[in-house]
Image (cartoon, rainbow, N blue to C red):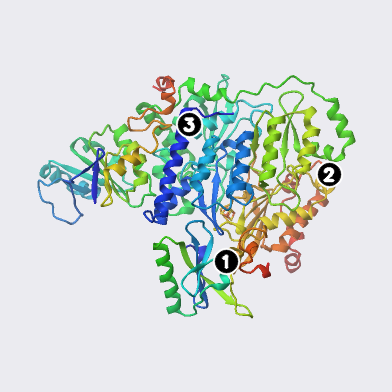
Amino acid sequence: MYRYDEFDATFVHERVEQFRDQVARRLSGELTEEEFKPLRLMNGLYLQLHAYMLRVAIPYGTLSGTQMRRLAHIARTYDKGFGHFTTRQNIQYNWPTLEDAPRILEELAEVEMHAIQTSGNCIRNTTADPYAGAIKDEVEDPRIASEVIRQWSSLHPEFSFLPRKFKIAVTGTTHDRAAVKVHDIGLVIKRNAAGEVGFEVLVGGGQGRTPMIAKTIRDFLPKQYLLSYLEAILRVYNMLGRRDNKYKARIKILVHETGIEELSRLVEAEWESLSRETTVDLPRAEYERIAAYFEPPDLAPAEASSAAFEAAQQEDRDFRHWVRTNVKEHKVDGYAVVDISLKPIGGVPGDATADQMDLVADLAERYSQDELRVTHGQNLVLAHVAKDDLHALFKELAGAGLATANSRLVSDIIACPGLDYCALANARSIPIAQDISRRFDSLDRQFDIGPLEIKISGCINACGHHHVGHIGILGVDRKGTEYYQLTLGGRADENAAIGKILGPAFDADGVVDAVETIVDTYLEERRGPDETFLDAVERLGFQPFKDRLYPQKQAAA
Amino acid sequence: MSEKTRSKKGGDKALTANRLTDGVAIFLATDGSWVEDAREARVEGDDAGHAALEAAGAEAEAAGIAVGPYLIDVARDADGAVHPTRNREVIRARGPSTHPHHGKQAEGLSGQEAA
Amino acid sequence: MALIKNGRLTADRWHLYEDDAPLQPDIPAIVSLARFKAERDALLRAHADLGVRLEPGETPDAIADDLDRLSVIALNFPSFTDGRAYSYARLLRERHGYKGEVRAVGNVLRDQYLFMARAGFDAFEVKEGESAEAFLAATKAVTNAYQRATDTRRPIWELRGAQPAIAAAAE
Ligand code: SF4
């Protein structure tokens, strides 16, 4: 994991002091809300329905036990004893006060964390594959590039007032767990024919009102030019991105309106010029200094198969189920990657109590090289667990309600905070997620259904990624009543696709039934258990689902 | 005022905002103070009354008490207590529906009985 | 409006002309890009000290050929949230090698001074009553920067003792 040196530490501490001064000026009346708002947003502080909300950055989703323990402490001291992990691999606190905010940031700075640029029209926290450094076939750990980007983008003097927010994601494998195709910039680490490491650069993906899949702007960028190339893209976007309409201000619209060929030409020309004028790229030594922090941990050699592990699976049925869903293969024999579900049946997706956070911090230290990950699916990951330890780990997690065996199953639902918290929401998201998860509480049924990702957003901003849900649910407001629109066929992986709307919206009760109808239709129509939900949707098209969901329409037709 | 907070034209209205220091949803009361309980909100039914509410809001904003004041549609229940009518404002006045022990509902404020 | 130049409160000798206002010769004048384009020759003849004001959307390219005859380029921030002028300032300095005054005008707020100074602005039209001390404090609030920009700050990666090696390869 990256560790701060004196420069990093001074930077975040000064930033805290700067914000303390800004808060004081706001409280004294020197700053108006209009002037203060962008300043607090640059420090992750929102004003929501019930209170302020603080979004803390978890760069590329990686945390140490100490950091997680501090997050628990903040939840306990300044909030109501819990936190909410988001689809941006961040954590949000729903109840901090403005007066406490500088103190919270100070507590974060002490453990090398911050809330810088978790909001506002700037370059946001860069996200990465949550299994980085632990899975096979990785060209390079994507967290190295992410950390390089984090530093470069922090208080960037040119790019802090962009037309709109700007999100970058990085993956180091061809199987994409970082949703790079629905980000403003997606980076796929790969090798060229000569074996050199670099990036495929994608641009213009995004969700929101006009969802789009990113296009490749450069097939191969040698890795030493990462920052200068990003600077060129950002400069072109800063100058040409639309500012007349906030729904047309993301770079995806610029890509769409300008065309990827023309935009690529502009970026390449800008890149060539700025490379002559200044030095943006890191020297090799600095890149390597950062990379050294992400060296794989020294894992004691172990047998590929562990007798204790096999035996425990024989004896303990719950453990066996959990292993089947939540344990993934590690690149080192005898080790595993563990998904910790924050989706208990009927729970709030992504919420964790302070006690749970403390426990997970301990477990990371004891079982996983002191390393934790937050996923964009709103779960946690222990990346390096010895197979021999899995059963003990499972039992401890189960004792705290953290061993739900549902990774990527139908009850592993992504949901944004929605109208229960969010000032922008049209409808509630969380209660829908809770109801659906209760409806599918039987594990046998979930196993039978297989991989199925449901994603729920409370408004078109799409923080719940509904556009890329296998089943997407979007909350809309109809004269003060909550309605929900269903989309089908979205996905966020390397074959990313935007789901399409199925038909008229349902009310809150109706939408849960509708989801069940869709699932039942799939189960009846599929060729067999090997045909996944997405495959079946692709083969069948929407008609069988529509026929079942809107029978009246059929009768009328 | 954003699209989300716009109330319909005419009818009974109250004035709400978030408190500067802690962001908590507050309502202008009949005695001119700001309270956390929507049931104590001052209600105005005509244009002049609405304008008076908005003027009080601008003043509270300038004084650094309230942030982003706006009018909400309200109604009175049988025993005369004020409650917001739009879903968003009901949740705002009450607290998150998914955490009944958080927010105003936990403190016996606004609309707990309706939850 | 007060003017802070090179970190000090300074009297502003410059006069910003509306497009329809008659020019008085020999008073240092800042005019809009449209007026500059329309009356370029006459303006350059009548004013030894001439400046042009660019709005967002008007890039420095539009005046690139005349930069050596312009003493001030004023970049307007109609709202502080419109950040195009940060790029323009850097381009003026780094691409066009402009050595004259780059002035921030419009909605210029204390919490943006640091970004502006780093992007190449050296003059700031600020709220009446703003002090030079507050200006300096704001530009010093964060000592070091992670990235190279137009100011003299060396980026943190350079301070860490690494050598800028790779730039050579780009040439
Ligand atoms: S999708 Fe809409 S409702 Fe949900 S968190 Fe984002 S802005 Fe709020």
Secondary structure beneath disc 2? loop
Going by the numbered disc 1, the residue's amino acid type is Glu
Crowd band around label 3 with a 10 angstrom C-alpha radius: few (<14), some (14–19), many (20+): some
Secondary structure beneath disc 3? helix
**C86 shown above or below A368:** below
Q: Can the viewer see residue A280?
A: no
Residue A447 placement (x, y as % from top left): 81, 44
Q: CA distance from mark 2 to mark 3?
A: 54 Å
Can you say which quadrant of the picture contains the C terminus of chain C?
A: top left
Q: CA distance from mark 1 to mark 3?
A: 43 Å
Q: Which residue is mark 3?
A: A8
Q: Can the viewer see residue A409?
A: yes
Q: Please report, as a chain letter, where disc 3 is located.
A: A
Residue C92 placement (x, y as % from top left): 29, 36
Quarter location, residue A512: bottom right
> Is the C-beta separation of discs 1 and 3 under 8 Å?
no
Side (left or right) of C33 relative to C166: left
Side (left or right) of A183 relative to B112: left
Side (left or right) of A290 relative to A455: left
Crowd band around label 1 with a 10 angstrom C-alpha radius: few (<14), some (14–19), many (20+): many
Picture quadrant of ligand 1: bottom right
Camera-nearest label, 1 or 2: 1
Going by the numbered disc 2, the residue's amino acid type is Gly
Q: Which residue is mark 1?
A: B89
Residue B66 placement (x, y as % from top left): 46, 62
Q: Which residue is mark 2?
A: A528
Camera-nearest label, 1 or 3: 3
Quarter location, residue A292: top right
Crowd band around label 2 with a 10 angstrom C-alpha radius: few (<14), some (14–19), many (20+): few
**A180 shown above or below A548:** above
> Is the C-beta separation of discs 2 and 3 under 8 Å?
no
User: How many callouts does the rendering have?
Assistant: 3
